[in-house]
Structures are given as structure tokens and as C-alpha cells.
Amino acid sequence: MLKIENATVWFEGRDRLVHALDRVNLDIAEGDFVVALGTSGCGKSTLLNAIAGFLPLSHGRITLDGRAIAGPGADRGVVFQKDTLMPWLDVADNVALGLRFAGLGARARRDRARELLALVGLADFAASFPYELSGGMRQRVGIARALATEPDILLMDEPFGALDSMTREQMQELLVKVWHRTGKRIFFITHSIEEALVLGTRIIVMSPRPGRIVARYETDFVRRFAAGATLKDIRLSDRFGPLREEIRDILHADRDEKEAAA
Amino acid sequence: MTVLDKMTALDAPSAPAAEPAGPPPVRVKTFGLEGRSTAPISLVTAAVLLGLWWLAADLRLVSSLFLPHPAEVFHQFLVVARDGYAGAPLADHIGASLFRIGLAAALAIVTGIPLGLLMGLNRWAKGILDTPIEFYWPLPPLSYLPLMIIWLGIGETSKVTLLFLAMFAPICLAAQAGVRSLPVERTQAARALGATRVQLFRHIVLPSALPEILTGIRIALGVGWGTLVAAELIASTRGIGFLIMSAAQFLATDVVFVGIAIISVCAFAFAYAVRLAERVLVPWRGKG
């Protein structure tokens, strides 16, 4: 269980303190696919950075299976929006980078990399270099790399934000497949309501200034997606549209309120 | 008219094409070189310059004391290659210079890279080492040449030290710039994959800084050749720089030209070698 209790973050801005995260409470259990949804500046990336261990909390605590998080570690795999593959390593070496840090031998690394590349559909690209791949393919390598060290949870910071909408849908399908097969917990950030609904078992809607959770949903669209339903089936299903509009209303009402106050 | 009719109407070509559909291909106009090769232009320029030199010498526009004829320079090269110059074979002169530059470059690389990386990573290292480096490196090597002689004597040590000092700064500064250009996300990614500090340095920081470091080495080698003549002013009996200075004292302009040509060929070869190293070590540079 990943437990987030009263997570609060203050940043030192140029001339004032910024309240980036306000008393966030969240549990992520085995098999959960939690999607944090919100506009930019709502603290969702701050929350992810805190879970990853890149950022300490001002108040509160985060524990993973009982251990307090003190810094980054291989028990939490991170997939970034920006391409963070190492350009001097080929795809297989990039995927196996965490295993190399863990001291695994060359053969074991290669076998594991091959396995993961097959999982993300890049079996034929083991010897390619990142600059030879498209954006979508690079993100697949990023996912395979994050899975290589067998992390307890996968943290994904708007991983498909920079992709075109066709590639994005392909990647969503791939991610659901990976989630279904590996049973990994996933914490996923997006600003797309549809993406949140299609992917999450649970959705937390966040609001800026200060960043906090304003609504929580549990959905089963992703389980139907995993069971073979197409994206189209899901989008056209009865509850999808109303739920999407409900969340949209929350986000808009919240923004109008903040603008009126400002 | 139905919708379908409209669509077919739109799809149909409006008029028979006047021009054949095919090449030539076009490209978007951009600012800059557009990646097109400049080699042919450079080669033609070189040929034109050589031709002008030849012409000026042939027509005796300038006294051969100032501008010897190209054929004369080439002849003098053959003479120097056969008989040597100032009591030593040409190979000894070239060898002496290559040894000094090579040794100084090796020392500058071995010290400049780790110190530069350290300065890029550690506040204390940066604070302490910045002062002496920023103080000395803009100085012309000729200005501290006398100090080198007084402190280190007239042997090889002072020459190699002078060259080393000239070459150290560009490499050290390049290594620092290499560390600074490291994207935050890249180090975060490595830390999230379980990298220790040592692994982070060895597997992420060093390769990330490599392109900048190689640029620094290329600049350093240029500076090194530029300082060579100054270094070999110090009581030398061997070296291309010495050969040039010695020939100048006898107004042997043609030998001066021979020396300059040898330096330029050597410097070009060094620069080319670094380019090859770049192609092998950082083929990913500037891509993605």
C-alpha cells in the first residue's frame, strides 16, 4: 500500500511562498490505477515528485508498504513526459539501465530487456538508438525501462502529453495491457478528462492554489478496456459522457471561482 | 445534387494538368546553412588563393624576400626534408613539436576533465578553482613565458608547462559547461532507476558531458598549436616553432613558409582526428 497522509508542499517563489500542495490524502492499493486529473499548476506533478522522492514534503508523510519515502529509488518506476532516454545507449541498454545500476550481469540484462521490449511491442528495435525512434516508440522504451527493475508502483507524469492523438490512443491501449498483465499499481497524471476516464480505476480531480483533491471517482471503464472493449465502445457507453461532463463542470466551476476571487 | 455527387465533383481534377506532376523536390527555406556542404566552395577558394599567390610571385609584384614563389617554397621543403635544418633532420623538428603538444594535451585532458566535472558538480571546487583559472586563462601565454623560464628553467619542462596552461583552460571550462547542460530530468530518471552517486557520475554525467568535452579538446589543440612558437622561443634547438624563428633571423622567408605549412598540416590532422573521435564517441550529438 502506498499511503499519502496530509502531504503539504510550500515552495519558495521569487517574492512569496507558493502553496503547491495542501493536505493531500491518498491510498494506492495493489492493482489500483489512480489517475490525477487537473489543470496545470494544480499540484499533480508536485505530488508525483514527492512520491518519486525528488521532492521532500513540508508536512505530512508518504509510505510505501510501511517504509517512509526518503529519496528516489528503484522501487518506484518513473515515466516522464520529456524524453529521458540516454542518447548514447541503444534501446536494450536503455531498458536495462536500472538493472545495470543494480549490478546484474550482461546476459541477465539482455534477457530481461528482450522480454520487456516484446511486452511493449519493440522486439525488433533492441539495437536501435533513441534518436532513430519516433516519440511514441521512445515512450514505450521509457515504460519498459521503468518496469525493468520490478518497481512496486509506476509513476507516470503526463507520459502521452506530447504525442499526437492517434499515437496517444495506441499508447493508452498498450499501457492498459501492461497494467493488466503485470498487475502493477500505477499513478498517472493527465490533464485530459477522457484519458483519465479511459485509464483510471480511480480518478482524483485536483484544483490549483493551493493544490488539493476536490473530487474522487471510481470507474470500471479501464477494466472493460482491459477485457477487450475498444476505446470507441467505452466512449459511446452510457455513463461515459455524463461523467465526462460532470468532471468538466467541476474543473470549470473551480476555475471560474478562482478567477472571480482573484 | 446529392452530397455524394458533390464529393465526387470535388475529387475530380478541375482541369487537365498543365505541368507534369513529379520532381524537382523542394524544401522549406530556412535561415543559416541548411546543412548543405561547404567543402566544394572551400576547395575552390583554396585553389584561387594558391593561384593568386603563384601569379603575384610569377609577375614579381612583390619581392621574393617578402613573398617567395610557391615552387621555391616547395623546393625548399624538399631541401629541408633531405638535409634537415639548423643541425637537425626535419623529422626531429616535427617530432619535438609533436611530443611537446602531445604531452601537454595529454596532461591537460587528464587534469582538465576531472577538475572541470568536479567544478560543475561541487560548489566548493567551483569557488576555489574558479579564481586562479579565471585569472590566468585570458592572459597571453607570451606574457607569462618569462616566469616559466625563471621558475622552471630552459628545458622541456617550461615549454610543456606553457603549452599545458594554454590547453588546460578550454578543456576544464568545456567539462564544466558539459555538466551544466545536463537536463534535470535525466538525472532524476537515473536516480529513480536506483543509481548511486558514483553510478550517476560514471553512467550519466560523464557521457552527457562528452560532446562538450570533445569540443573543448578541439579548441585546446588549436590554442596549443597557436602557443607552440612562443613555447619554442625558449632556448630550443629542435621544433617547428624554433625552425620558423631561426629561419626568420636569417630572412629565409621560404623556410618560414615551409614551417607554417607543416604546422597547418599538423593542426588540421589533429582537428580531423578529434572530429573522427566525435563521430565514433558521440554519434548521437545534436540528434533528438
Image (cartoon, coloured by chain):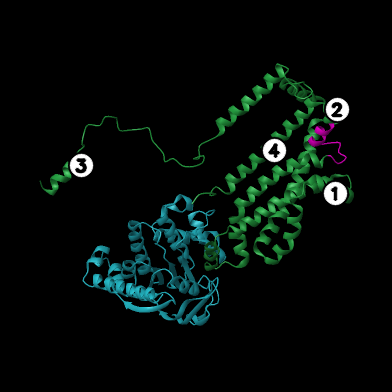
Chain colours: A cyan, B green
Q: Which residue is mark 4?
A: B267
Is there CB contact under 8 Å for labels 3 and 1?
A: no
Which is more N-terminal, label 1 or label 4? 1
Q: Mark 4 or mark 3: name the one nearer the start of the chain.
A: 3
Given contact means CB atoms under 8 Å apart, are the residues at marks 4 and 1 in contact? no
As drawn, the label of residue B11 is 3
Under circle 4, the secondary element is: helix
Q: Amino acid at mark 2?
A: Phe
- Calculate the distance from the C-alpha at mark 3 to the C-alpha at mark 2: 84 Å
Question: Quick check: marks 3 and 2 in contact, CB under 8 Å?
Answer: no
On the image, the x and y values in percent for residue B200 come to 59, 63
Q: Nearer the viewer, residue A24 or A139?
A: A24
* Labelled pair 1, 2 in contact (Cβ < 8 Å): no
Q: Residue at x 45, y 80 (%)?
A: A22
Q: Which residues are magenta?
A: B233-246
Disc marking residue B250:
2
Same chain shared by disc 2 and disc 4: yes
Q: Earlier in the sequence, mark 3 or mark 1?
A: 3
Q: Which residue is mark 1?
A: B148
In the rendered image, residue B126, in percent from the top left (x then y), is placed at 70, 62
Decide: few, some or many residues near mark 3? Use Cα within 10 Å; few <14, some 14-19, many ≥20. Answer: few
Mark 4 burial class by Cα count in 10 Å: few <14, some 14-19, many 20+: some
First-in-chain label (1 vs 2): 1
On what subunit does the disc labeled 2 rest? B
Rounded to the nearest whole Å, what is the CA distance between mark 2 and mark 4? 26 Å
In front: mark 4 or mark 3?
A: 3
Viewer-proximal residue among B143 and A204:
B143
